[in-house]
Image (tube, helix red, strand yellow):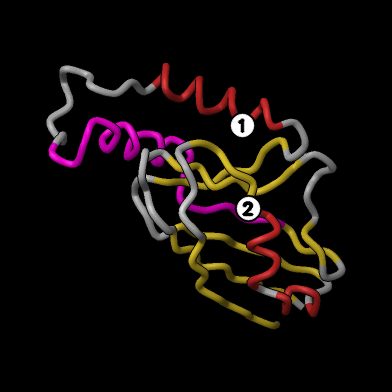
Amino acid sequence: MNFFQQEITLRPFPRGFHLITSEVLSALPELQQISAGFLQVFIKHTSASLTINENADPTVRQDFESHFNVMVPENASYYKHTFEGSDDMPAHIKASLLGASVTIPITNGSLNLGTWQGIYLCEHRDYGGSRKLVVTAYGK
């Protein structure tokens, strides 16, 4: 069994949903040494998240952002955690809804994603800054 792990820092992204598949693959070229296994990607933040979805049509990512902003609004009167800005508490909720990690099968040295799938960084803050990911590939 082989294990490879790398921590990477993503450049700051604006609020929204962003494809980061290529950044993840660039960070771990050792993935090509695995014939059957898994890649786990974990984000070390509580106001951004990861998910897998449509990688071709950018309007899907725009619709994600629009929907999440309606589903989890800013300035809700019941929020108590407000000292970091009106986007902070909603960002924590959105991050919990989507999750902090994704796991993808590796087959013959490549991610075994569907034809239209990619890894999203879901940036829920207006000015979230750079984000740190831990990427771990393991298999034989």
Q: Which residue is mark 2?
A: 20
Task: Give the quadrant of residue 39.
Answer: bottom right
> Where in the figure is residue 94, as x and y percent of width and height?
40, 34
13 w.r.t. 107: above or below: above
In the image, residue 99 lies in the stretch drawn in magenta: yes
Q: What residue appears at the point 50 percent right and 42 percent down from the top-left corner?
A: 122
Q: What residue appears at the point 42 percent right and 58 percent down from the top-left corner?
A: 130
* Kind of residue at disc 1: Arg
Tell me the element at label 1.
Answer: helix
Using residue 57 as the reference point, say whether residue 19 is left or right of it.
Answer: left
Q: Which residue is mark 1?
A: 61
The quadrant of the rendering that contains the N terminus is bottom right
124 w.r.t. 86: above or below: below
Q: Which residues are magenta?
A: 83-104
Q: What residue appears at the point 62 percent right and 79 percent down from the top-left corner?
A: 4
In the image, residue 53 lies in the stretch drawn in magenta: no
Which labelled disc corresponds to residue 111? none
Graded by Cα atoms within 10 Å as few (under 14), some (14 to 19) or many (20 or more), the crowding at tag 1 reads: many
> Where in the figure is residue 104, as x and y percent of width and height?
68, 56
43 w.r.t. 76: above or below: below
Q: What residue appears at the point 80 percent right and 69 percent down from the top-left corner?
A: 36
> Where in the figure is residue 115, as x and y percent of width and height?
85, 42
